[in-house]
């Protein structure tokens, strides 16, 4: 009888110990979730980066994506009359508000040689923007509207992108404003596409169509990581190969356009009609100084 009582007492103590351990563990886990979520296992962190819906990211960024409508005078000749004639050609594109003071970025090819530009905001308002500057080398252009404070997108960091990261494209394809498509990053630093002089594209399989040019490529946090600019169409069957200019490149170009209206780049150019040729530099010449500063040999 005594032995039975001792055993029951021991079992009761063990059960209480287990219950106390569970309660303490749950309390610690609760505090970690609230105050130090970064300490959670990698699986939990990855789950937070893959929500069932990206509506929040779109809600944050879409108000800063505007539709661009342009008109160009296009010269043509009819078979009956060889005199040059002109017609008005309308086209659509996209742009992104990057500054609440009214600065918008788009592609150079969207606004190149246009006679008229109008932009429409997500709230329905129209404006005729001023072209602050363009850079054909990167296919970027900076526009400005005077409408008071307007919603601007947050700039992300394209240098942190990894292949297979989820991205969303927002734009005005075929005049269908505020269209959103989803894809992943297929590659980064993509060059030798022969689209522009400076190429370091984000390649994505998010659907990009006519009118998406100049629109936003965003991450799952609603931050701008690229400006959609082109789609590879080598044949009618090519799909899922689209390119965006990384926002890290966009930043530098936009600052130059704000300050100078163009991008000022250093260029020596050892070829005909280059700065070096204009200065009289010839084959076989030895450069001893630049701007009066002697060149010091590293040998």
Image: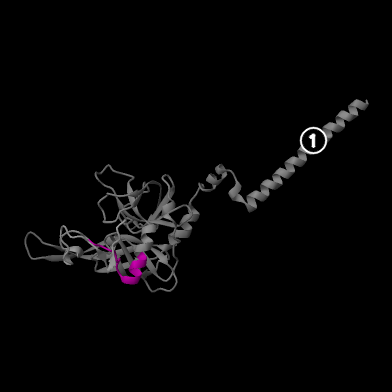
Q: Residue 48: x and y, percent?
A: 54, 48
Where on the picture, by quarter, is residue 102? bottom left
Judge whether residue 66 can be spotted in this image: no
| Foreground of the two, 214 or 41 | 41
Report whether 154 appears left or right of 255: right
User: Residue 190's x, y, as percent?
Assistant: 33, 49
* Side of 281 where 97 appears, left or right: right
Span highlighted in magenta in the image: 254-268
Picture quadrant of residue 127: bottom left
Depth check, front residue: 113 or 18 = 18
Specify whether residue 126 is in view: yes
Q: In the image, what residue occupies the spot 36% across and 58% down?
A: 249
Q: Nearer the viewer, residue 99 or 137?
A: 137
Number of numbered labels in the structure image: 1
Residue located beneath label 1 in the image: 15
Determine whether, in the image, residue 98 is placed left or right of residue 277: right
Determine if the magenta segment contains residue 260: yes
- How is the protein colored in the picture? one colour
Q: Where's residue 204, x and y in %? A: 37, 48
């Amino acid at each position: 009888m005594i032995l039975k009582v001792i055993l029951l007492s021991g079992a009761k103590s063990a059960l209480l110990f287990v219950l106390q351990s569970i309660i303490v563990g749950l309390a610690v886990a609760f505090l970690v979730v609230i105050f130090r979520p970064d300490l959670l296992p990698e699986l939990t962190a990855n789950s937070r980066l893959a929500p069932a819906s990206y509506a929040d990211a779109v809600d944050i960024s879409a108000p800063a994506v505007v539709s661009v409508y342009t008109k160009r005078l296009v010269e043509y000749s009819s078979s009956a009359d060889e005199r040059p004639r002109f017609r008005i050609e309308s086209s659509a594109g996209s742009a992104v508000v990057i500054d609440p003071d009214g600065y918008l970025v788009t592609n150079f090819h969207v606004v190149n040689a246009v006679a008229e530009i109008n932009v429409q905001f997500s709230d329905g308002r129209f404006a005729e923007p001023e072209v602050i500057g363009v850079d054909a080398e990167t296919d970027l252009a900076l526009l400005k509207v005077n409408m008071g404070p307007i919603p601007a997108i947050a700039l992300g960091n394209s240098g942190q992108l990894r292949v297979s990261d989820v991205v969303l494209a927002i734009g005005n394809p075929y005049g269908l404003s505020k269209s959103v498509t989803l894809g992943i990053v297929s590659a980064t630093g993509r060059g030798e596409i022969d689209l522009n002089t400076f190429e370091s594209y984000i390649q994505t399989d998010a659907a990009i169509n006519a009118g998406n040019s100049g629109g936003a490529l965003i991450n799952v946090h609603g931050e701008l990581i690229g400006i959609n600019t082109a789609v590879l169409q080598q044949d009618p069957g090519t799909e899922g190969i689209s390119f965006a200019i990384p926002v890290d490149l966009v930043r530098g170009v936009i600052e130059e356009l704000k300050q100078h209206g163009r991008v000022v780049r250093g260029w020596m150019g050892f070829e005909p009609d280059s700065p070096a040729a204009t200065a009289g530099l010839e084959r076989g010449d030895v450069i001893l100084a630049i701007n009066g500063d002697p060149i010091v040999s590293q040998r």
